Amino acid sequence: MTTLWSRLTKQHDTAAGIYGTILATSIVVGLSETNDPSPPRALEFLLVSQIVFWLAHVYARYVAGKAEASAPGADDLVAIAIYEWPIVRACAPAVLAIVLWWLGALSENGAYWLALTLGIGELAVLGFAFGRRTGQGVLRATATATLDAGLGAVLVLVKVIAG
């Protein structure tokens, strides 16, 4: 009988990273269209949102494990939390951009554009890594990277259209 932990260790965390990056990029787009939050408030909103989504994923995977009759325990819950951690880690580039704004190194607009640019770059890198991990050749992995980066570009388009 396979445990939830053994199934998780056979998987890769790239998908959680891609999801987390799309989430962080979406939050940045939303923040950029609000009534000028302060850097600490923007940082708080970004981090709390990412953590809440991470917890939701941890909970959902844990409940799914119970539904599959594998009776996950506390060790499995910790394993799930670690496995899903890339959702939170994915907001690091956006956090860096907002901290640079807070320190006065970037304007608000500059911070948001840097966060969006870094998010698209992160999506491309994760897409390429995912492609290679799943056995794709360099050309197909590059196409996967382009598709993932395209998702981020759509979010940037939404920002541009929104103003």
Image (cartoon, grey):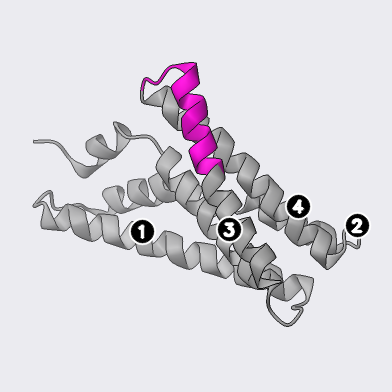
Expressed as whole percent of the image width and height from the top left, the position of residue 21 reads: 54, 51
Which residue, given by chain and number where applicable, does mark 2 sit on? 105
The quarter of the rendered structure image containing the N terminus is top left
Q: Are marks 1 and 3 in contact (CB under 8 Å)?
A: no
Q: Residue at x 65, y 72 (%)?
A: 162
In this orientation, which residue lies closer to the viewer: 94 or 22? 22
Span highlighted in magenta in the image: 135-149
Neighbour class for label 4 at 10 Å: few (<14), some, many (≥20)? some
In this orientation, which residue lies closer to the viewer: 154 or 77? 154
In this orientation, which residue lies closer to the viewer: 115 or 72? 115
The quarter of the rendered structure image containing the C terminus is bottom right
Q: Is residue 147 above or below residue 69?
A: above
- Name the kind of residue labelled 4 in the image: Leu
Neighbour class for label 2 at 10 Å: few (<14), some, many (≥20)? few
Could you tell me how far apart the alpha carbons at marks 1 and 2 are, in whole angstroms? 34 Å
Secondary structure found at label 3: helix
Q: In this view, does 129 lie above or below 63?
A: above
Q: Residue at x 29, y 39 (%)?
A: 8
Could you tell me how far apart the alpha carbons at marks 1 and 3 are, in whole angstroms? 22 Å
Which label sits on residue 114? Answer: 4
Secondary structure found at label 2: loop
Which residue, given by chain and number where applicable, does mark 3 sit on? 155
User: Does residue 90 appear anywhere in the picture?
Assistant: no
Which residue, given by chain and number where applicable, does mark 1 sit on? 57
Q: In this view, does 105 lie above or below 125?
A: below
